[in-house]
Amino acid sequence: MKLFGKRLFRPHSIWIRKLVQWFFFLLIAFIAVNHTLVESGAGIPFLSSASLHALCPFGGVVTIYQFATVGTFVQKIHESSFVLMVIGFALAFLFGPVFCGWVCPLGTVQEWMAKLGKKLFKRRYNHFVPTRLDGVLRYARYLVLAWVVYVTAASGTLIFADYDPYFALFNFWTSEVAVGGLIILGTTLLLSLFVERPWCKYACPYGAVLGLTNLFRIFKIKRAASTCKADGACSILCPMNIPVDTQNTVRDPQCISCLECTSEAVCPVAKTVVFTAGAVK
Amino acid sequence: MTLNSKSLAVILFVVLFGGIALSAALGWWQTESSKVAATYTEGEFAGQANPADIRGSYTFGDVEKNFGIPAALLAQAFNVQTDDPSTFATKELETIHAESALEVGTASVRLFVAFYNGLPFDLSTDIYLPQSAADILHTRTLTPEQLAYLDTHIAPDPAAPAVDSAPITESTPEADSAERLVKGKTTFQEVLDWGVSQSVIEQILGAPMPNPLTTIKDFCTAQGLSFETVKAQLQAEVDKAK
């Protein structure tokens, strides 16, 4: 895609994904601003002024316990969070964590920072963390998930909001944001200069939940070993460092279904790495 | 069946926005609380809206809808200067009355509404009203108990001339004690910092203390505890620890 004669996206990238990411980033940003405007008596007509909590599918996940035991939602969580949670799970059962790779604005911002990191460090970018350490750190997001679910169930309040970089990203101008959230957001953005999607890889509790669907999603990333040239391009450019070229079917919980490894993007051989519900030769 | 990125993008939009549209059609898409106060479940007033359920997120307009008290009258009672009192959130009262040594906040609105409408209300804890609210309530029919409570629970108006009340300077013990008031935004960490041990706090809560950064009011609301009761007990411990 070109604009004023200049290429907007790198060749062989999933450009429509970038557009979708931009759309959701702007949508959430406008809604967050509108929420502030409405609270001060103004507001943009025809645009939702819902709080960020009401539009977060992870809010539905953390309130499951209270809903099941008491029949109420955690403070600040509403029915919309539950609806989005169900939609998120439905999409994940079909396509894996497509929410992470296509919708989540925090993931988008990390990718924007990654562009700068790639310019700075070239091929070394996203390969700084030693493989063994990286492998261990990837389990940390499950600990974060367990902690968030526990403290939410125990307190009945959204304690995670005080540490949530996503909430901080769209509320940094309000008094609702906690210092902890801002620090974690700043750290995430800084680390994004060295590692692609550090929050998603090591800490995101929602990604931890959705990632599990990669084990049984209907549509999977599959590699046709018969036509694969084993040039490693898919693995090198995978934002989540998944060794796609060594797997016939990607079941790694870290895959975000971004399709950047497929033959539609980086793989130079047609129909070799595909997103399919069927078999490949 | 193989999907390309464009197909996936279309499906994503259809499922996401289609799901939202469907849930909205079914009445499930709610992005804010209904702002309908819980009702008394027993006794003479069963079925009527209970002022104890007024939340900080309620605007004066929400209070008007639930209890029939005009938003403009509420604004007058609580000295709120605004062109549109119906949009004023009760949680903002704490900011407006921040200078007051005694807290005027959402609990004050609950008390005012209960007295104004002649509804039962727990008077075992100390809740304060500005003089302007008390003046309005004196025009209503109150029981002797309510009148006695009202006359001893008026928060001094910080804007009023000091000649009507004993002057308090920053260096006096009274001023120091005012800084250590358990209010709506007080966290457990602050109470710990004021010298009350975790075990004492947990004894008062009757439950393990949550993350110290949790506000006491949020915790009480979530656990179904009376914030006013917990506040009074914690305040007594804070005063003891001084």
Image (spheres, coloured by chain):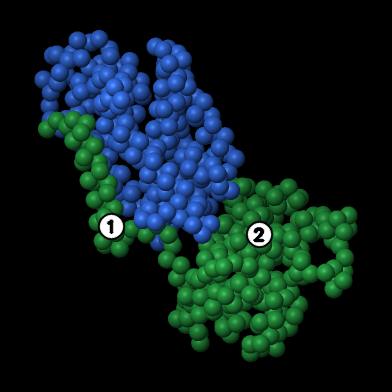
Check disc 1 and report the residue beneath it: B23
- The residue nearer to you, when weighing A122 against B114, is A122
Q: Which quarter of the figure has residue A228? A: top left
- On what subunit does the disc labeled 2 rest? B
Q: Could you say which disc has been placed on residue B95 in the image?
A: 2
> Residue B53 placed where, x, y %?
52, 70
**Left-right relation of A47 to A41:** left
- The residue nearer to you, when weighing A100 against A211, is A100
> Residue B236 placed where, x, y %?
75, 62
Whichever of labels 2 and 1 marks the residue nearer the N terminus, that label is 1
> Residue B112 placed where, x, y %?
62, 76
Chain in green colour: B
Q: Amino acid at mark 1?
A: Ser
> Residue B70 placed where, x, y %?
54, 78
| Up/down of B68 relative to A1, above or below | below
Quote the CA–CA distance across marks 2 and 1: 37 Å
Label 1 sits on a secondary structure element that is helix
Tell me the residue at 52%/34% (across/down).
A185
